[in-house]
Amino acid sequence: MSWWKKILGGEPEHEKVDYYEEGLALLKEGKFHDALTSFRLALREAPGDTVVLQQIAIAYTRIGMADEAKRTYRSVLEKDPSAPGAHYGLAYLLIRSGEEADAIRHLESFLANPPRGADAQEHISHARSTLAELRGEPENLFDGHGEQP
């Protein structure tokens, strides 16, 4: 934790700390409170950064602060209405709190502008199946290529 070392004087002043990267590493380690601190420090350096805010919302979710996570995701969507990660995260928080109609809207928005990248397909598939379930649609018996598995 670079921020802790800095407080205790264990890090030279001239070294620039990448609090965002530090926060990501701490999230992976399951150190959610520490990750939240790092992300907040990253936000100081880049106020309003929607990528940092989304990571803050994830940290809030992991430590059980669902209301804070929802507020943070909504803040991201005010700044960037098409932010797929915010729609995705908010949708699942809304499902947990029984707000299925709003969750459907956010899943639809996520799927209208899905992310790209290596792990995106897993999230897209999860969102599609969740949306179908919320709508009461039958499970798709096909693998997406018109063939049964």
Image (tube, helix red, strand yellow):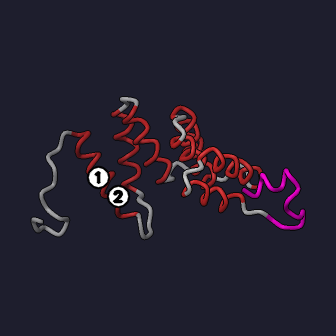
Residue at x 41% of width, y 35% of height: 94
Q: Which of 37 and 5 is in front in this view?
A: 5
Residue at x 13% of width, y 67% of height: 146
Relative placement, left or right, of 40 versus 89 is right
- Kindly identify the amino acid type of the residue bearing the numbered disc 1: Arg
Q: Residue 49 placed where, x, y %?
A: 66, 53
Farthest left residue?
A: 148
| Part of the protein shown in magenta | 1-16
Q: Is mark 2 on a helix, strand or loop?
A: helix
Q: How crowded is mark 1: few (under 14 residues within 10 Å), some or many (20 or more)?
A: some
Which numbered circle lies on residue 124?
A: 2
Q: Residue 24 placed where, x, y %?
A: 60, 58
On the image, which quarter does residue 101 sit in? top left
Relative placement, left or right, of 136 versus 12 is left
Q: Residue 27 placed where, x, y %?
A: 57, 54
Q: Mark 1 points at which residue?
A: 128
Quarter of the image with the N terminus is bottom right
Q: Is disc 2 in contact with disc 1, using a CB cutoff of under 8 Å?
A: yes
Depicted 113 relative to depicted 34: above or below? below
Q: Is residue 14 magenta?
A: yes
Q: Is residue 9 magenta?
A: yes
